[in-house]
Each structure stands twice: as C-alpha cells, then as structure tokens.
Image: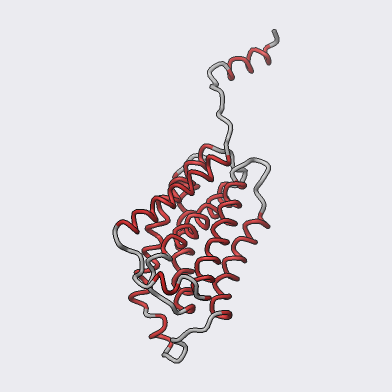
Amino acid sequence: MTSTDALILGLSADLAPVRRRSVRCEVGALIVLAAGELALILMAGGMRPDMGEVILSPFMAWKIGGLALLAGVSCAVALRSFAPPAASRRELAFAFALAVLVMVAGVVVTNSAESGQLLIERLAPARGLRCAIAIVVLSLPLMSLLAVLMRRAAPVHPKRSALATGLAAATCGALVFTVCCPANDPLYIAVWYAVGIAAVAAAARWLLPRRFRL
C-alpha cells in the first residue's frame, strides 16, 4: 500500500454513509408545513369572513393563482439549487422576474373599487405594514425547513441558494396569508406583499450563508 492509499484510507475511515436526497420528501415536507400553518389559521378563525363570496372573483384568482404559481416555481428553483450540478443564475433571475410580473399583473388585469381614492389611502401604510409582518412571520418556519434541507445538501453557490430559499419561503407564506388578508386593492397587494417577500428574501440571503456551515 502506498502512502497515498494509506492517507485516503485514513481520511475516509470515519466517514458515515450519506443519505440520498429525496425531492419528493422535501416537497412533501414543505406542503405539510404550509398546510399546517393554513390549518392553524382556519382553526383560530382567521379566514376573512367574506371568503365564500370573493373566492371566485377575478381578483382572488389573480391573488391566489399568481402566488401559487410563484410559490411552486420558487420552491422548484430553491430545491434544484441545493444539488451540486444545479446553481443556475438564470433560474433565480426567472423566479424574481416572475414575482415582479405577478405583482404588476394584478394592477393591470383587475379592476379596483378603490382606484378613485388618494394613493396614501389605497396603500394604508399602518395596515400594510402589519400585512408585510404577517407574511414574514408565516415565512419563518418554511425558511427554517428549507435552511435545514439546504444544509443537508451540497449547494455550489450558497448565496444564490439562500436567496432562492428566501423567495420560496416568502411566496409560500404570502400564499398562506391570502386566506385571512381582507384587502381587495391590487395596488395594496402588489406593494405590501412585495415588501414582505423582499424582506424575507433579503434576510435569507444575509443570514443563511453566515449562520450555516454549508
């Protein structure tokens, strides 16, 4: 046995088998966690009282459908970024471009009854800030789960993966929040949901590479 063989044998002697990733299990865990948050909101009576009346409206179709599409794409990008061969900057850019498109589409394709009000009245900063904070709070458990999955994997570009993780967690949190958000103004939704999502994505980009040994 050569010295090189002995060195390799010594370095690998204490290594334990690595459990292979299961994307299905990871997706399932995300769905279960998001469903659990939704169930807690419903059990606490947090669903907006007129949901039965507005659920089929074009506004809610944009609000729920757009966020569901964005959450699905963002989660796919985040989970793909955890694998060594996949760290595409284009996929991350596409996810953020889609986020902007979804938010802008609400202002364009829906009719707002509040369009005649002053801008400050439509934005309602005090209420909007509470909505953004609620999205952040709902995103934290999802971001924690994704951070664990990220740590167990082998991302080639941790900073990109962290940013994708934040976007995925934030859009899932925003999707869950739609069941209790009473706002109907698409401008309000576009602005304050974007604030909440951007805050989570920025926090993940700053925090995860610093706090986790990836």
Q: From this view, report whether residue 93 is shown above or below residue 53.
A: above
Give how far across and how far down residue 123 sits, in percent.
41, 80
* Residue 202 visible from this viewpoint: no
Residue lying at 56% horizontally and 47% vertically, measured from the top left: 158
Q: From this view, report whether residue 55 is shown above or below residue 150.
A: below
Q: Classify residue 74 as left or right of residue 86.
A: left
Residue farthest to the right, as pictured? 2
Residue farthest to the left, as pictured? 44
- Report which quarter residue 66 is drawn in: bottom right
- Report which quarter residue 62 is drawn in: bottom right
Give how far across and how far down residue 29 sits, in percent.
48, 44
Q: Nearer the viewer, residue 3 or 134?
A: 134
Residue lying at 57% horizontally and 56% vertically, measured from the top left: 72
Give how far across and how far down residue 134 sits, in percent.
37, 63
Residue farthest to the top, as pictured? 1
* Residue 207 visible from this viewpoint: yes
Q: From this view, report whether residue 59 is shown above or below residue 196.
A: below
Q: Classify residue 130 as left or right of residue 195.
A: left
- Report which quarter residue 110 is drawn in: bottom right
